[in-house]
Amino acid sequence: MRSYRIALLMLLSLFVLSCKKDKDETTPEFDKNQLLTNYGTNLIVPTYERLDESVYLLEVKVNDFISVSNQSNLLALRSQFLSTYEAWQSCSFMHFGPSDNYTLKQVFNTYPVDTSLINTNISSGTYVLGAASNTVAIGLPALDFLLFPNKDLAIALSRINGVNSVNKKQYIKNVVLQLKAAITSTLSSWRTGHLSTFISSNGNSQGSSLSEIVNAINLDFEKFTRDGKIGIPLGVRSLGTPIPSKTEAFYSKYSLVLFKESIQQLKQYFNGESSSNIGLDDYLNHLNDNNRTARLSTRINSQFDIIIQKANLITNPISIAVISEQANVQKLYDELQKIIVLLKVDLSSALSILITYQDNDGD
Amino acid sequence: MKKIIFALMATSIMMVSCKKDEPETAGPSPIEIVLPSSYNFDNVSYGGQTARLDMLEAMTAELKKANAGTQVDSSLLARMYSNSGNPFGDAVLDGSGKQLKNKTYSSVGAFNFSYFEYLMKRQGDISQFAGNTWSAGNAGVATSGTKSYFFDENGVEYTQIIEKGLMGAVFYYNIAEVYTRPGKIGASVDNTTVTPGEGTDMEHHWDEAFGYFGAPIDFTSSVTANARYHAKYSQKGQAAGLETTDKVMNQFIKGRYGITNKNYNYRDQAATQLRVEYEKILVTTAIHYLNSAKSNFSDNALRNHALSESYAFIFSLAYNSDKVISNTDFDLVKSYFEVAAGPTTVPSFLAITVADINSAIDKLSSVYSLDAVKGSL
């Protein structure tokens, strides 16, 4: 009888054990819902709202300039253009979901532009800005070209008021209207449903919101920040020969400001800076990353700071600096390379996110 | 004794509570048949299909020479297509007696063999400009990073139209219209006389359908090595959570099992369901490339390449007379990628807009009930 009882007890304990397996074995789960709520509600949507507001003001300034084409209106238009370009920077690394659907990044910031195509469009007066053949004749880079034919305000004004001025101003307006349509659609998509989809998609798998956040940061940083803003002008894709004309905001010479802005905004985004402040850094800290002397979140933040320090050593716009301060730009580029390892390898593996944006198509 | 009863009760409670964690769907009932997990049957043979898959690979390699700036030999392509005059330099293929051309869809109503011959000829002609850089209106090579593609003046990559198009007009057409239809697996087809190595006629026909899929016999979502053509592309839908790979594979297995065991309900269910699932490979891949075209909209090389891929997967839908999409919707989706050229239309990607691409995606995803996953494909 006794051995039966023992056997039963053993059986019982077996069941208890097997039941336990289905429960959590680790520390309490990180509240990803809070993280995604913060990113969606306090960071992404407000960022698009700022861009929307900025583009609205841009349209106002364009209309003012078209009705009275004088220096003060051109100055106001230029200044609004530059604030819009700054507001754009964080949208660049939030490129997924509705933004991807309306190809916000391609519409806003494809550079360098094809200036002869822009001029052909202007002189013919017939064009579809959304057509595939015009992707290099639109967006903020097209405005950069059209509003800054010369740094000097008086000279620039006389150029804009010169040949084809009516068509040219109409083109400026059409470019702005295209920007407006793209940001309006994106923002309205977020407001009318995507925000809740975004918050509820709280896994780690391909297509989950966290995966989209991390993939978008990496893709943008690698292709558009490291390569686009710095590497390509520096010549890393052209055997060391700098190509200044491929710099962002080449005509307004605003490239260095935009670069720093983009790094600062990305750092804030990484840390989830807002009223609730729950960011990727908190998620990393939660995952108990103590096997190194410094936490991964600390190392990423320090590397952002180093990048800003290196950028502060540069005194000229990047298009000029790649020639006159090449060593400083190279040092900056090297620091950008280092953060890519932290973001693409360490961050993604710590969060169990698969980097999916490489083209693994093979043909 | 009471204690023992108590312990037994406790145990049963545990068992009940444990059971809750298991999936609630019922396991196989006693009469339900458990299908094999792979396409591992006796007397499976599809050497002719494998040869045609290999031939298309050789043709694609010739077509892609234009990407590297070399003119393509269109007469060689034509001979490869009809396997005449030992075009492959490979004794097995040259001597196989098989060819792609006489298995290509040949009627009106969809692109047929003469369309592909025309494209091969034209690829040979215009690839004399393969040394030029592509621009809108001028054939040439466009490059993005390490990738280079040769396009015609409208941004169309004939390599993709021909390769993916023949996957449709030969592989898919023969699966959907020939080998899963009564003429090949119906009551009049012999399913008793076993030819060693080839099975019965009916078994062999089904195996030939499987051969066109491009999958290893143990292909699953997790065993993907050596998958090519549509088998490879089935992984796009699989990755988006649609189980496309597993569903297509299961229908192939179910149909062959049904034929071999003379379970004709299984055969007929599998034939119908296979066409449905296979069609999803084409649609999910088309949407995948449309998404890619959007993501790379400002990149001539990547955008035109992706649009060429998606256009070919879209027009391939026509090779199945039971296709889910209506002719009106099919023509509409196709029209986003075409412009008028005299009495006919030609593919052209110069004037396409993101709105066009979104309209195509939305139409396909609504027709095929893919709205929930269209963004992750």
Image: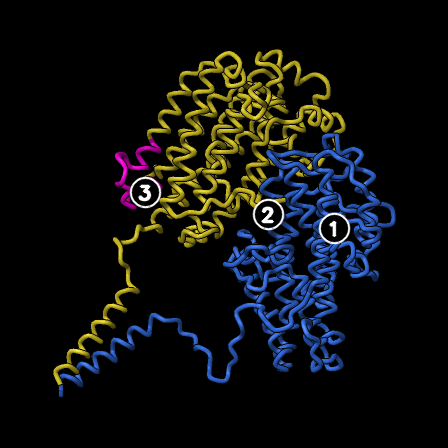
The answer to whether B126 is drawn above or below residue A208 in the figure is above
The disc at residue B90 is 1
Q: Residue furthest right?
A: B343
**Quarter occupied by the N terminus of chain A:** bottom left
Residue highlighted by disc 2: B291
Chain drawn blue in the picture:
B
Q: Position of residue A44 (x, y in %)?
A: 43, 41
The answer to whether A233 is drawn above or below residue B158 in the figure is above
Q: Position of residue A307 (x, y in %)?
A: 39, 25
Q: Is residue A25 left or right of residue B138?
A: left
The answer to whether B346 is drawn above or below residue A228 in the figure is below
Q: Residue at x 40, y 29 (%)?
A: A264
* Amino acid type shown at disc 1: Asp
The front one of B198 and B337 is B198
* Amino acid type shown at disc 3: Leu
Q: Dot 1, how many residues are within 10 Å of its Cα: few (below 14), some (14-19), or many (20+)?
A: few
Of the residues tagged 2 and 1, which is closer to the observer? Answer: 1
Label 3 – label 2 distance at C-alpha: 31 Å
Please identify the quarter of the rendering in which residue B40 is found.
Answer: bottom right
* Element class at badge 2: helix
The disc at residue A253 is none
Please identify the quarter of the rendering in which residue B129 is found.
Answer: top right
